Amino acid sequence: MDILLGLQWGDEGKGKIVDFLAPKYNLVARFQGGPNAGHTLNFGGQKHVLHQVPSGIFRSDIKNVIGNGVVLDLVILKNEITALQERGAAVKENLYISKKAHLILPTHRLLDAAYEKAKGDKKIGSTLKGIGPTYQDKIGRLGLRVGDLCLPNFRAVYKDLRTQHLQKLEYLNFGIESLPELEENFFQAVDFIKEFQIIDSEYIINQEINDQKKVLAEGAQGTLLDIDFGSYPFVTSSNTSVAGACTGLGVAPQKVLEVFGIFKAYCTRVGSGPFPTELFDEVGAEIAKIGNEFGATTGRPRRCGWLDLPALKYTVMLNGVTQLFMMKADVLSTFEEIKVCTHYELADGTKTDIFPYDLKHEDIKPIYRTFKGWQCELKDLDNFEKLPKELSEYIAFIQEVTEVPITVLSYGADREATLLKHQF
Ligand code: GDP
Ligand code: IMO
Ligand code: MG
C-alpha cells in the first residue's frame, strides 16, 4: 500500500493528484477525516469537489473505499453520490463503505457549533461538520457506526445518544431549532445509503494487498492539523499522519511501501491557529489571488505565506516520506523574489529549525532565504531537466534540506498540468 498525505495545513492538492494517479491503482481508500475535507478534481474543463468519497471515483474499475477511520455524514454523502452519478461515475459498483466508520449525527453538528461558540475568540475555526464531537464519541465508546444502520433497533440507539447530546446542548444554551429538519434529512439519507456496498473493508483491502494489487491511501487535511503532532489545539480530531492510514484502514505498517508527501510551493492555512510564515502584505494577497485560495468546503479565504521548511522537515520526518510532490508552482511564476523560511528565531534570540512545542505562545520570527523567481509561464512541461533554472534551484534546495526527492511537480489545477520524474 502507498500512502499520499498532506504535509502542511491541508488543501495541498491531494484530490488532484489522487485522481491523476488512480489509474495506476486497483483500490483508493480514505482513512480519516470526513466532510471537513474538500478535494478538488479538474478534468475535461470541469471542476468537481469531493468531501468523503475517495478521489479515484471517476476512474472505472477501481475500488474506492471509505475506511473505518473516517467519520461519515450520510446527508453529505447522499448529495455527493447523486452529483457523481449525474456525472457518470459508477458509484454503486465502485464505492465501498466500512461498517466500522463512525456516523456524524445531526446533534454532532449542533455540538460542533455549540463548542466553537463557547470558545469565543479561542475558536478553532472548525468547518462545523461535526468532526470533533463524532471522534469524541468514538473515543468515548458511545458512537454509532455505519454497520449499526442495519440494527432492528437503530432508531432506539440513535435516540439514546441524541438524548445525551441534547443535555449537553441545553447546558451550553445552544438552540436546536434546526434539528427536526436535520433529522428528516438524516433518516432519508440512511435509507439511501443502505442500498450501497457496506462491508468489512479491512478484509477487502488486505485481500487486495495479498493478491499483489496496488492500494493507495488518500489522506485528508494535513500533518500540521494532526491531533498529536499538529499545532494543537488548532488541529482536527484525527491522526492525519501516516499512522492514521494503518489504524484507519486496518493495514499493518510493514505493508506500507511508498509515502507520498504533498506540499504547496508556499503555505496556506484556513481557520484559526499559528502560522509562522503568514504574509499580511500585498505579496500574501497576490498569492491568494493567483492561487485562488478559498476553502473548497467552506469557501473561507485561506491565509497565505511562504514555504516553511522547519515545518516541512518535521512532517517529512513524522511520515517517513519517500517522495515529495510539489504543487501549485505556477502560482509563484510572476514573483521576482521567492522566500523560504529555513529557521525560526525564538523570543530569546535562539535560532532553530525544530518545530516548537507551543507554537501559539512562542514569539517566532521566521528567518528567510531569498530565491530569484523564474518569472515565466509554466506550461506543457515534459522533463524536469528542462525546467527554468530558477525553479530547478528552488526544487534542489528543498530536496537538499528535506533529503527527499521531488518526483511530481504540479503546475496547474488540471489533471494534465502534472510533471512526473518517473512512472508510477
Ligand atoms: P486538497 O484538499 O488537498 O485536495 O486540495 P483542495 O482541492 O482543497 O485545494 C487545492 C486547490 O488548488 C484546488 O482548487 C485545486 O484545483 C488547485 N490546484 C491543485 N494543484 C494545482 C496547481 O498545481 N496549480 C494551481 N494553480 N492550482 C492547483
Ligand atoms: P482537506 O482534506 C484545510 C481545518 C479547519 C480548522 C481545523 C479543525 O481539504 O485538506 P474540523 O472541521 O476538522 O474540526 O476543523 O482544521 N481543516 C482543514 N483545513 N483543509 C482541510 O481538509 C481541512 N479540514 C479541516 O479549517 O482550522
Ligand atoms: Mg481541501
Image (spheres, rainbow, N blue to C red):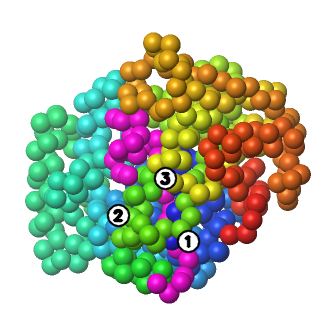
The answer to whether residue 275 is above or below residue 329 is above
Q: Is mark 3 within 8 Å of ligand 2?
A: no
Residue at image coords 75%, 65%? 422
Element on which disc 3 rests:
helix
Q: CA distance from mark 1 to mark 3?
A: 26 Å
Left-right relation of 291 to 260? right
Q: What segment is highlighted magenta in the picture?
A: 210-239
Left-right relation of 6 to 422? left
Left-right relation of 23 to 385? left
Would you name the residue on which mark 1 appears?
A: 57
Q: Amino acid at mark 1?
A: Ile
Q: Amino acid at mark 2?
A: Thr
Residue 15, visible in the rendered structure: no
Disc marking residue 353: none
> Which numbered disc, 1 or 3, marks the residue closer to the eye?
3
The quadrant of the image that shows the C terminus is bottom right
Would you name the residue on which mark 2 appears?
A: 247
Would you name the residue on which mark 3 appears?
A: 319
